[in-house]
Image (cartoon, helix red, strand yellow):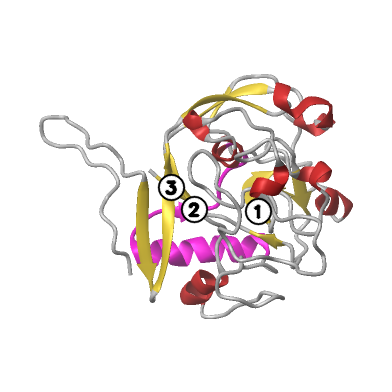
Amino acid sequence: MAFAMMFAQCGSKPSSSEHADGEENTPEEKLTFTVNGVTFNMIFVKGGTFTMGATEEQGEDAEEDEKPAHEVTVSDYYIGETEVTQALYEAVMGENPSDKVGADLPVESVDGGDCDYFTEKLSNLTGRNFRLPTEAEWEYAARGGNKSKGYKYSGSDHVADVAWFNDMKTGTHPVKGKAPNELGIYDMNGNVDEYCSDDYAPYSKESQTNPNVEYEESEGQIVRGGNFCEDAETCFRVSARGYTRGYVFGSLGFRIVMSF
């Protein structure tokens, strides 16, 4: 991603339960939560094994740090239907740090520590386990999980269908303004870049299960998805990677996951 490389009360029921006879309920595809009057949705992602990185549909656009493509297995989880909005962030944190203000706009101008503090407070409010996605969880969801149709972008081969981009004048847009991907997740490309929990590190060709990378020589924390001020070719593909060294930008926000 261009910028990253340059600066480099809860009203839901349990998603799944096991009865005495061992029969397990089917997870709900969408869980709805309300916190201090603000409602948000979490989308179920059925775990599975996928090829992460420079896969065939990425073509010649794939960068070296997306290679080698490698097999990754992730467990079931829930992911935010949208990026964290300013309304939700303020409901949890009691403040709004964003440069461009609007309840339905993604929160931005946060650092990794802010994201972790938010998920901690949200977890305490709801009794669930919220956190940042791993890079593998983010890419698997962006690709459509087990419903993937093999698109180059998250939900389409045409970036304008699913992403806000190349628009410095307007800046961020309200969430859910473009088409969702195969899982019903919005804005995984464009609008704001999204933090992941991993350190930025080279890929390995080895197969992995639920990776969450810590790397002593890392140049920063992984961000994914691209943002409103970048060109489509730069970073909007589902495999494109970026990082930040802890700086705060009006084009950098986050999305949350919930452990299953």
Residue designated by label 2: 81
Residue 23 placement: quadrant: top left
Numbered tag placed on residue 194 in the rendering: 1
233 horizontally vs 44: left or right: right
For the residues labelled 1 and 2, the Cα–Cα distance comes to 13 Å
- Secondary structure of the residue carrying tag 3 is strand
**Which residue, as the protein is rendered here, is positioned at the far right?**
6
Numbered tag placed on residue 43 in the rendering: 3
55 horizontally vs 231: left or right: left
Looking at the rendering, the stretch of residues picked out in magenta corresponds to 111-136
| Residue 186 x/y as whole percent | 56, 51
Q: Residue at x 78, y 44 (%)?
A: 235
Q: Which quadrant of the rendered structure holds the C terminus?
A: top left
143 horizontally vs 39: left or right: right
Between disc 1 and disc 2, whose residue precedes? 2
Between disc 1 and disc 3, whose residue precedes? 3
Numbered tag placed on residue 236 in the rendering: none
| Residue 144 x/y as whole percent | 54, 35
Q: Nearer the viewer, residue 138 or 22?
A: 138
Counting other residues with Cα less than 10 Å from the Cα at mark 1, is it few (<14), some (14-19), or many (20 or more)? many
Residue 193 placement: quadrant: bottom right
**Which residue, as the protein is rendered here, is positioned at the far left?**
21
Q: Residue at x 60, y 20 (%)?
A: 207
Q: Is label 1 or label 3 in front?
A: 3
Label 3–label 2 contact, CB within 8 A:
yes
